[in-house]
Image: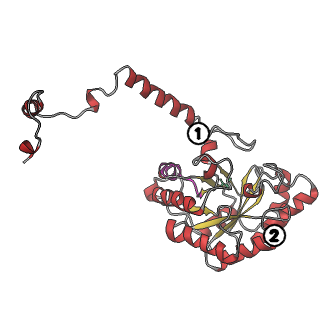
């Protein structure tokens, strides 16, 4: 069955919302899928206008917008608040809420409850879960797959995430590429296939050697979105703050800066501060006027030496 193309270059008002069948079709037709993160309303408006296909409200928000040292501390309440802001700013991309650390590890019930919050409270279209494979995440692989099956059985579209899964970075030995030995590559492939079998509609591959991705792709029937996983995937995802040059922290090798927005922001605030200090801002065009007669009346009322009783003049 063919779906209606979305025409990303069309103005947002004329663009059709992204759907799961359309994503599957994009994979079948070899049309690259564009995914990016967003965490607030203006960011969502930007990615909507730019015509991306999928917006991930990523737990990377912990570092990019909330100032935590890793993705681990961010809470479900914080994620839902950000996702609600994104939903208000983006109508046509598929919006995916990223299940944060601690929101799904305890049980299948906890995982479904967290996923339901993204859908009900933030109107997300789907959620994403990080796989904790044999490579040593906080939940073993059977548990991860059980969570994935529970969410899918609850009728919530689920995106998987394999390779470097930042929530388990400590267990994985730090923020390092996964799959650089044959045994590790088998692990990545096994995680991806298990999530595919569990019913994920798409899977993120993060920090996996390009050649390993290429081999695993032969077995992938659902769209694979890569970040540091080479060009063989069905699409790419980057963190909004990395690609726009807003975030100053350490940038992994797989990010590319397509703009230098932070520099422009600092320059803008600097220019504002200079103008305030030099009394060049505000200028006449930034001020409101008052009828001269009203101003005179006002002046007489507030003139120094006159007893102050505003009530006399406000009736
Ligand atoms: O949270 C995030 O931004 C992510 C992407 C890197 C895929 O999970």
CA gap, disc 2 and disc 1: 35 Å
Residue 213: x percent and y percent?
81, 56
Residue 31 percent across, percent down from the top left:
66, 57
Compared with 201, 50 (above or below) is above
Task: Name the residue nearer the viewer: 130 or 194.
Answer: 130
Residue at x-position 27% and y-position 30%? 285
Q: How is the image coloured?
A: secondary structure
Task: Look at the image and give the residue range highlighted in magenta.
Answer: 42-56
Query: Is 166 in the magenta?
Result: no
Q: Residue at x 82, y 63 (%)?
A: 218
Residue at 92 percent across and 54 percent down: it is 181
Residue 267 placement (x, y as % from top left): 51, 28
Question: How many residues crowd around disc 2 within 10 Å: few (fewer than 14), some, or many (20 or more)?
Answer: many
Which disc is residue 208 wearing?
Answer: none
Q: Main secondary structure of the magenta part?
A: helix
Q: Is residue 219 visible?
A: no
Q: 134 above or below 298? A: below
Q: Nearer the viewer, residue 3 or 259?
A: 259
Cβ atoms at labels 2 and 1 below 8 Å apart = no
Check disc 1 and report the residue beneath it: 246
In this picture, residue 161 sits left or right of residue 91: right
Q: What residue sits right under mark 2 in the picture?
A: 141
Between 258 and 173, which is closer to the camera in this rendering? 173
Q: Secondary structure at mark 2?
A: helix
Question: Relative to 237, is 269 on the left or the right?
Answer: left
């Amino acid at each position: 069955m063919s779906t209606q193309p979305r025409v990303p270059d069309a103005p947002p008002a004329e663009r059709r919302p992204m759907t799961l069948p359309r994503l599957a079709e994009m994979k079948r037709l070899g049309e690259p899928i564009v995914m990016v993160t967003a965490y607030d309303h203006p960011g969502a408006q930007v990615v909507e206008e730019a015509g991306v296909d999928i917006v991930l409200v990523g737990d990377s928000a912990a570092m990019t917008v909330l100032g935590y040292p890793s993705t681990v501390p961010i809470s479900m309440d914080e994620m839902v608040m950000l996702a609600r802001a994104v939903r208000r700013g983006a109508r046509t991309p598929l919006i995916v809420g990223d299940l944060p650390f601690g929101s799904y590890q305890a049980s299948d019930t906890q995982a479904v409850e967290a996923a339901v919050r993204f859908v009900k409270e933030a109107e997300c279209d789907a959620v994403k879960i990080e796989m904790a494979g044999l490579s040593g995440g906080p939940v073993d692989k059977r548990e991860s797959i059980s969570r994935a099956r529970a969410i899918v059985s609850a009728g919530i579209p689920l995106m998987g995430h394999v390779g470097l899964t930042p929530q388990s970075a400590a267990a994985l030995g730090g923020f390092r590429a996964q799959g650089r030995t044959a045994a590790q590559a088998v692990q990545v492939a096994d995680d991806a296939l298990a999530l595919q079998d569990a019913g994920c509609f798409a899977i993120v591959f993060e920090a996996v050697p390009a050649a390993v991705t290429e081999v695993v792709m032969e077995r992938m029937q659902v769209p694979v979105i890569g970040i540091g996983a080479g060009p063989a995937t069905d699409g790419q995802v980057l963190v909004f703050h990395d690609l726009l040059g807003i975030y100053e922290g350490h940038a992994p090798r797989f990010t590319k800066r397509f703009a230098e927005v932070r520099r422009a922001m600092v320059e803008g605030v600097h220019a504002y501060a200079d103008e305030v200090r030099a009394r060049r801002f505000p200028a006449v065009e930034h001020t409101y006027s008052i009828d001269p007669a009203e101003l005179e009346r006002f002046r007489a009322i507030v003139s120094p030496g006159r007893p102050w009783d505003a009530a006399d003049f406000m009736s």
